[in-house]
């Protein structure tokens, strides 16, 4: 998925100016996130605008795509402008820590494919480092911002590395969330999970957390489950 553009059924994502290209993580989050009763949505760290566009395709929601990097912000605007849902998606260049202050209790749903690398060794691209490393946006900062921006009982959906799940859940709970759903993502049969999709609800809940697993490939082919999940998007 490293080309200058990636074509989906109903839209095209151009990515030549973005540090983080279209990848399986973003597609998974956009397809997996439940959108029921989501009339106002925020995508934190929108990058190319992919997830915001995916959610616009299957909702009537007003969507705010928030991005700190100027080039990515510009490219997200381009991709959204070329999509059929441009009138319902707005792109905001901002640091989420600043943006959230004036948007308390505003959103029904927040999604994020956040930076997650915590290694000390980084690459040569500063833009890619910002997009990938948690010192540019920590899990704690992200969960606090999401909690502040969400309405009571609003939902917060993310995709993160499996090994970071406990840390992220701990931060989310301390920020006022309860875990509503969890899907462990397995790339192929016999492998340990590599990613985890998490859905949180703001406020307390006595509901049991829905647990599931998602297999991406089987016998070298896209699994039927993954194919079904992404059927509205992939060509």
Image: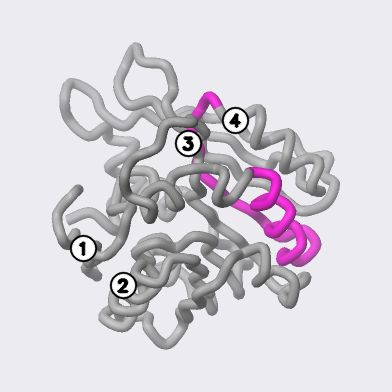
Q: Residue at x 72, y 75 (%)?
A: 103
- In the image, what residue occupies the spot 83% across and 51% down? 203
Q: Where in the figure is residue 204, as x and y percent of width and height?
A: 85, 46
Membership of 24 in magenta stretch:
no
Sequence-wise, the earlier of marks 3 and 4 is 3
* Magenta stretch, residue numbers: 139-163
The vertical placement of 205 against 68, above or below, is above
Whole-angstrom CA distance, mark 3 to mark 2, is 23 Å
The CA span between labels 1 and 3 is: 22 Å
- Horizontal side of residue 92 vs 70, given as left or right: right
Residue at mark 1: 16
In front: label 3 or label 4: 3
Mark earlier in primary sequence (1, 2): 1
Q: Which color mode does the image show?
A: one colour
Find residue 126 and name its label.
none
Closer to the observer: label 1 or label 4? 1
Name the residue: 38% across, 44% down. 25
Mark 4 vs 2, N-terminal side:
2
């Amino acid at each position: 998925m490293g080309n200058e553009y990636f074509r989906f059924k109903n839209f095209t994502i151009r990515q030549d100016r973005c540090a983080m290209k279209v990848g399986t993580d973003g597609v998974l989050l956009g397809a997996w996130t439940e959108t029921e009763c989501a009339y106002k949505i925020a995508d934190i760290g929108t990058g190319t605008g992919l997830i915001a566009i995916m959610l616009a395709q299957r909702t009537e929601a007003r969507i705010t795509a928030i991005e700190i990097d100027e080039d990515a912000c510009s490219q997200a605007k381009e991709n959204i402008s070329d999509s059929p849902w441009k009138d319902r998606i707005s792109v905001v260049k901002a640091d989420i820590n600043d943006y959230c202050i004036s948007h308390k209790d505003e959103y029904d749903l927040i999604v994020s494919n956040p930076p997650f690398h915590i290694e000390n060794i980084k690459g040569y691209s500063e833009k890619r480092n910002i997009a990938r490393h948690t010192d540019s946006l920590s899990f704690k900062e992200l969960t606090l911002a999401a909690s502040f921006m969400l309405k009571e009982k609003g939902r917060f959906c993310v995709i993160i590395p499996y090994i970071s799940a406990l840390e992220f859940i701990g931060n989310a709970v301390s920020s006022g969330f309860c875990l509503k759903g969890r899907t462990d993502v397995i790339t192929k049969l016999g492998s340990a999970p590599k990613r985890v999709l998490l859905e949180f609800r703001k406020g307390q809940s006595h509901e049991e957390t829905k647990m599931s697993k998602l297999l991406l490939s089987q016998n070298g082919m896209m699994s039927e489950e993954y194919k079904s999940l992404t059927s509205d998007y992939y060509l």
